Every structure is written in structure tokens, then in C-alpha cells.
Image (cartoon, rainbow, N blue to C red):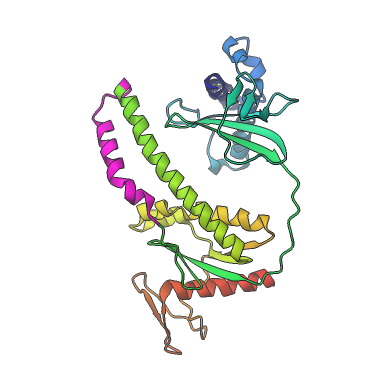
Amino acid sequence: MLINIHCARAVYNIMLEAKIKHYEESEEMLHNTPAQYKEEYPWLKEADSLALANAQLNLDSAFSNFFRDKNVGFPKFKSKHKCAWRYTTNVVGRNITLEDGYLKLPKVGKVRIKQHRPTEGKIKSVTVELTASRKVNVSILCEQEVDIPIVEPKEFLGLDYSSPCLYIDSNGNEPDYPKFFRQAEKRLAREQRKLSKMKSRSNNWYKQKRKVAVCHEKIANQRKDFLHKLSKELSDNYDVIGIEDLNMRAMSQGLKLGKATMDNGWGMFTTFLDYKLERQGKKMVKVDKWFPSTKTCHECGKTKPMKLNDREYVCPNCGMVFDRDWNAAINIREEAKRIAIS
């Protein structure tokens, strides 16, 4: 596996260097292939040819994006120490098989795996990744024909993002997000402090770096597990779910809520929720971020200005008093209902 990972990264950098020289001379994209460099670099022959071909496709895609929009940025070299250690290979004939708890890969052979869920459909490609904690993850892409049912929307829900608890819904409920990063922050700080005092690239430095990676990996796995279960519960119980189309990166940088915002994983949660709803013939509606969900009274429709530190909405027209986020969630639900039905 390592030879495939290293060769895929190496051929990416070799081809990128040639493309850069050609671009500087002609300002056009060079159409080169990994096969052109196997004589000069004979060790490339030891790797899976489809892994090298996928590296070429990734590089061509990066250049196409650059020529389409210069703001995307010029493709960069892949660093051995910073980029993800992974490669992708495709199914040709029976070069990849999965049976009896073993996965057969080209140039690797049969490898025993711990399969988390049964494969359904036809295997198309396999991505192998070596994580920073030295674990090997394998993602298997399958093609399957699925009949998506047509669901008439009856149950609607609005979600208003809330930094302390992830969200408050239009029913007044909140998921009580456990804040996994905060729970592990002291331990992570201790392990990072040990790493900072060690000689860089030494054996002990690599051992300690792995301990730090294990901490980060556990936090990420806890967060992903919680968000998967939460999104599954919501997608099973509601037909249309409305959310605000927020720029979470800008929000984390603009407010003093960077850690809390990034720890919540709101973007990951909405991605999970979107595809789970879609599979069931349901819908997630993104309400425009300029929609005045917070400033509008859900009872009479009157709007008024609101500050960030105002936690209650007091309507100047009807005199009703609501929790700020609950009022916004109801308005988001009603706007999502209007968009979904129209």
C-alpha cells in the first residue's frame, strides 16, 4: 500500500513540474501521462498503474479549474509531511474483490479487513488512506440502482443554528451537543506540549506526534458518530427541514466563537442531513441568509432590529415575548414550507 501511496504522490509532483515548465513557456496546459516517466523513474512500475492514472486525473482536474477561474489558484506540489496519504484505484475485471473478510487489491494482494457495513451494488473504485494515527481506512465506492420514493411533504421542521447547543428547532428542542473538543482539550494540550519540547523528526517526536493524532482522531470520530445519529433521527421523522444558508467559516473568524463553531460541525451535520433526506425522497431547504428570521415575530409578522446580545424577542406590535432562537426557527420552518410547496 505504501508504494502505491508514495508513487501516486511522486508522479503527481513529477507531472506538475513538467506542466509548470510548459505553462511558463506557452501559457497552455501540457497533456502528459504517467507512462512517459516510467523509463526515467523505473520504481513507478512497482505501483498500481490505476493509482497513477487517478493521480493524473486529479492533476488535470486541478489545472482545468485553474484555467476556468484563476481565483481558484495554481496547483501546488504535494508534500510528504503535509498532504493526505491516500490513493484511489479502479475495478478492471476481477482485480478488486471483497469476500470472506478479505479485500483483494492490485499490487497488494489479499488484506484482512474489518467491514463496517455490507457492500451493496457493483464495486467501482477503492480509496486507501493511511491516517496520521497509522490506521488504514478503505472507502469502497459502489454503484447501485435505487428507487427513491415520492413523498408528499406533511411534517416540517426549522433549525436555527446555535453555538452553545448546535441548533434549536421550531418545536423548541435542542440536541444538547456534548462539545467533544472541549472534553478532550486538556489532554490534547498536554500531548501537544510534550510534542513541542521534543527534537523535530526524532523517533520520540514521531511517537508523540502519533499520540496527538490519536486524540484528534477520537474527537473527529465522536463528532461524526453523534451527527450521523442525530441527522438519521431527524430525516426519519420529518419530510422537509429548513436551515439557514450560513457561511460558517466567516462566522468562526468574525466572532469570538471560533472553537465552538468549528467543534459543532454544522456544515458536516447539514451534509449528512441533506443526503439522508434525499435518499428517502424528502427535502432539505436552505433559506437565504438575508431572510430576517431573527428580526420577525412569527405571530404577527412585525420586524424589528435585533442585537447579538438580545436573547429574547419582544414584539413591539403584539407584545409577545419569545426565545430569540426558537422564534427564528419557526420563521425558518414557515419559509421552508413556502419554498417547498411553491
At 59% from the left edge and 32% from the top edge, which residue is drawn?
127
The count of marks equals 0
- When asked about the image quadrant of residue 166, the answer is bottom left
Q: Is residue 267 left or right of residue 148?
A: left
Q: Give residue 148's position: percent from left, percent from top.
A: 73, 56
Magenta segment range? 178-203
Q: Give residue 226's position: percent from left, percent from top.
A: 47, 52
Q: Quadrant of the N terminus?
A: top right
Q: Is residue 7 magenta?
A: no
Q: Is residue 199 magenta?
A: yes
At 56% from the left edge and 72% from the top edge, which residue is drawn?
333
24 vs 179: above or below: above
18 vs 125: above or below: above
Residue sitting nearer the eye, 204 or 103: 103
Q: Is residue 210 left or right of residue 284?
A: left
Q: Quadrant of the C terminus?
A: bottom right
Can residue 108 be seen by looking at this rendering? yes
Can residue 202 be seen by looking at this rendering? no
Residue sitting nearer the eye, 218 or 261: 218
Q: Is residue 120 left or right of residue 41?
A: right
Q: Is residue 323 left or right of residue 301?
A: left
Q: Which residue is outermost to the left?
A: 197
Residue sitting nearer the eye, 27 or 65: 65
At 58% from the left edge and 75% from the top edge, which residue is drawn?
334
SS assignment for the magenta stretch, majority: helix
- When asked about the image quadrant of residue 47, the answer is top right
Q: Give residue 202's position: percent from left, percent from top.
A: 31, 21
225 vs 285: above or below: above
At 64% from the left edge and 66% from the top edge, which residue is drawn?
239
Q: Give residue 289's position: percent from left, percent from top.
A: 52, 65
Q: Which residue is outermost to the front?
A: 100
244 vs 41: above or below: below
